[in-house]
Amino acid sequence: MGDRRTSNHSEVTDFILVGFRVRPELYILLFLLFLLVYAMVLLGNVGMMAIIMTDPRLNTPMYFFLGNLSFVDLFYSSVIAPKAMINFWSESKSISFAGCVTQLFLFALFIVTEGFLLAAMAYDRFIAICNPLLYSVQMSTHLCMQLVAGSYFCGCISSVLLTSVTFTLSFCASRAIDHFYCDYRPLQRISCSDLYIHNTVSFFLCSIIILPTIIVIIVSYMYIVSTVLKIRSTEGRKKAFSTCSSHLGVVSVLYGAVIFMYFIPDRFPELSKVASLCYTLVTPMLNPLIYSLRNKDVKEALRKILGKRNIFI
């Protein structure tokens, strides 16, 4: 028995994703809900990328970041949603060990990348509003490429570290993950390893990812608000706030859910699943809607594309 309790993760060939603890007859409703939201994620983010790539007027730093944000949203929701929908119909609800590793790695990669992209977008708005005359010089194509590449690099490094630390744990307590995807906190619950080092590394990663990006966003918007309040015309202030409100809405939803999920004590698994839905599906669904409905340039580009289609019809 002692040998069995100290066996390592190499003996685990698969896990069971418990998902939502609801009555079986509600699985159909959950499946349809996930399907609808995921379809909107696909349509919205693919559409946003297509609009940005086809309209020359959107060839600016802000839309370059927004296009990458849509790409990230599309892929990290695709890491989660299809498997969750399959499990609503599956009896076993299993995921292979390799599949679990891949899911955690890709999700961590894209969610961290999104955090850094949102910080880069806040900095872009800061330069555009506070230093408009120097905007084209300071937000050069080279700098934009560096900021995006740096976001993906930070996402990749963080993902490698988190995945490596998580899957060095021993999973001899259970194979049942009380979540609808492989995340490190639910995996902690079924581990019989000493979690001190894992918790230390996880907290360190969360701190160096979330705190710097939040600081950049907060400081950028402090300067933006200060500058906007100095604008004398009401129309000018309204336009400036309208440009930034979309970004602030996205930041609030994403970071609110992430902070609840990873910084609040893990005592309410079902609430954690609901919070996870906010940044795995709800945020990727809302981002294209928020940025398109409140953005004059995107709406004009969409009308132009739809107008061309009507001509050919």
Image (cartoon, rainbow, N blue to C red):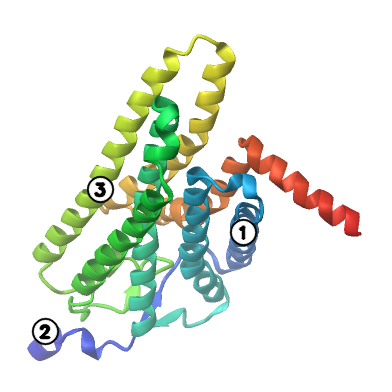
Assess disc 1: are there few (<14), some (14-19) or many (≥20) residues with their C-alpha within 10 Å of its C-alpha.
few
Q: Position of residue 292 (x, y in %)?
A: 62, 42
Q: Nearer the viewer, residue 294 or 34?
A: 294
Instruction: Name the amino acid, label 2.
Output: Thr
What label sits on residue 170 in the rendered view?
A: none
What label sits on residue 263 in the rendered view?
A: 3
Q: Nearer the viewer, residue 273 or 246?
A: 246
Residue at (57% x, 42% y) in the render: 291
Q: Nearer the viewer, residue 4 or 303?
A: 303
Q: Quadrant of the C terminus?
A: bottom right
Assess disc 3: are there few (<14), some (14-19) or many (≥20) residues with their C-alpha within 10 Å of its C-alpha.
few
What label sits on residue 33 in the rendered view?
A: 1
Callout 1: SS: helix
User: Residue 197 sits in which quadrant?
Assistant: bottom left
Instruction: Name the amino acid, label 3.
Output: Phe
Residue at (28% x, 59% y) in the render: 154
Residue at (63% x, 67% y) in the render: 28
Q: Position of residue 158 (x, y in %)?
A: 25, 63
Q: Of all residues shown, which one is farthest toward the top?
A: 232
- Is tag 3's residue or tag 1's residue first in the polypeptide sequence? 1
What label sits on residue 6 in the rendered view?
A: 2
